[in-house]
């Protein structure tokens, strides 16, 4: 059975600690795009914000967001990392043209794959001698199609940085879908470049207690018996070290937000563990560049 519950949850994980735009800096003006498209055995929803300006640092941010859109939509369901359609090579300053290309190609690609999958499974069902004609018809009539919900929207902003949230929900058959994407992506507004260097090299071992505290807080939201002492009972780890999330941490008003994806450190039923480490606790482990970006010097 398909479920969007995790998609909705991750889309709001770090928004609870929202950073409003600092009026001393110039905000990144964006335009929002929203579409709901359908094709054979396929549904695609599309939510995107792109900066209006296409030059200077804001133009670089815009290019970075288009790169994310390309990396998500051109590889949907490509388990071997094979590109499913070419990168857009037209006028990058034309938002409408860029977006129309990617949503159209993504829908066509998904529909072709979903139709091929349906036809293959249809053959098996029709050949199954243990099913009656009525049962076969019911299975085919209710056979679930593919679904992809693409989301890349502005999450927060200060005078020094802007954060966009990249979270997608994908269902390609099976018991349930899952959340993909790149999480919260931070851009330095001075350079327009993506900023990933928040934590000092070698800080993982020193931050184990902070990660334990954060995970205990997350799991305690649903089970008050979870403590720092027994939180490891909820984790699937190779060894004793809790890794950093694959998704880069993101800045919020109160601290640095860490979010683990489904299955990354815990069972699917545990959701996507997320927590904020306050700046006064994480500050010793931040790089000089991060301290500057976050105005914590």
Image (tube, helix red, strand yellow):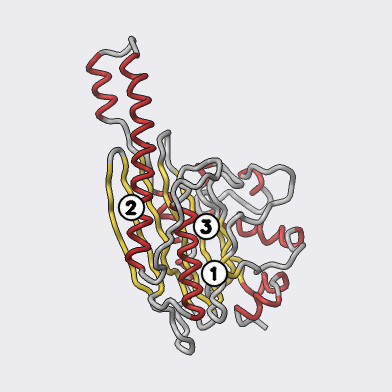
Q: In this picture, is 263 found above or below 252?
A: above
Of 6 and 221, the residue lying toward us? 6
**Helix, strand, or loop for circle 3?**
strand
In the rendered structure, the answer to whether residue 153 lies left or right of residue 42 reads: right
- Circle nearer the viewer, 2 or 1: 2
* Crowd band around label 1 with a 10 angstrom C-alpha radius: few (<14), some (14–19), many (20+): many
Left/right of residue 190 with respect to residue 53 in the rendered view = right
Task: Kindly identify the residue that appears in the image at 50 percent across and 47 percent down.
Answer: 83
Identify the element where label 1 is drawn.
strand
In percent of the image, x 49 and y 62: which residue is there?
67
Sequence-wise first label, 3 or 2: 2
Question: Which residue does the numbered mark 1 point to in the structure image?
Answer: 186
Q: Quadrant of residue 124?
A: top left
Camera-side residue of 290 and 8 = 290
Measuring from the top left, give residue 265's x and y in whole percent. 61, 47
Residue placed under numbered mark 3 in the picture: 182
Q: Quadrant of the N terminus?
A: top left
Q: CA distance from mark 2 to mark 1?
A: 28 Å
Picture residue at 63% right of the left edge, 73% below the top = 279
Point out the residue furthest to the top here: 129
Is 244 situated left or right of 122 in this image? right
Q: Residue at position x 54%, y 72% from top?
A: 187
Query: How far is disc 3 from disc 1 in space, using C-alphas?
Result: 11 Å
Q: Quadrant of the C terminus?
A: bottom right
């Amino acid at each position: 059975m398909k479920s969007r519950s995790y998609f909705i949850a991750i889309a709001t994980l770090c928004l609870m600690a929202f950073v409003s735009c600092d009026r001393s800096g110039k905000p990144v003006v964006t335009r929002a795009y929203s579409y709901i498209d359908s094709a054979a055995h396929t549904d695609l929803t599309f939510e995107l914000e792109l900066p209006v300006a296409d030059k200077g640092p804001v133009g670089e941010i815009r290019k970075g967001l288009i790169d994310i859109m390309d990396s998500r939509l051109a590889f949907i369901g490509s388990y071997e990392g094979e590109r499913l359609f070419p990168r857009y090579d037209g006028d990058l300053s034309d938002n409408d043209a860029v977006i129309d290309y990617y949503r159209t190609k993504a829908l066509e690609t998904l529909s072709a794959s979903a139709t091929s999958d349906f036809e293959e499974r249809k053959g098996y069902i029709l050949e199954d001698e243990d099913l009656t004609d009525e049962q076969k018809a019911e299975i085919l009539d209710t056979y679930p199609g593919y679904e992809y919900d693409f989301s890349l929207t502005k999450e927060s902003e200060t005078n020094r940085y802007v954060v966009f949230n990249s979270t997608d929900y994908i269902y390609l058959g099976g018991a349930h879908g899952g959340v993909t994407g790149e999480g919260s992506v931070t851009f330095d507004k001075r350079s327009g470049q993506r900023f990933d260097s928040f934590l000092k090299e070698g800080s993982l071992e020193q931050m184990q207690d902070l990660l334990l505290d954060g995970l205990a807080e997350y799991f305690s939201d649903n089970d008050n018996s979870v403590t720092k002492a027994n939180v490891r009972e909820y984790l699937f780890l190779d060894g004793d070290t809790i890794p950093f999330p694959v998704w880069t941490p993101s800045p919020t008003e109160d601290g640095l937000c860490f979010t683990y994806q489904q299955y990354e450190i815990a069972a699917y039923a545990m959701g996507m563990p997320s927590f904020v480490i306050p700046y006064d606790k994480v500050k010793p482990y931040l790089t000089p560049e991060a301290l500057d970006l976050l105005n914590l010097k």
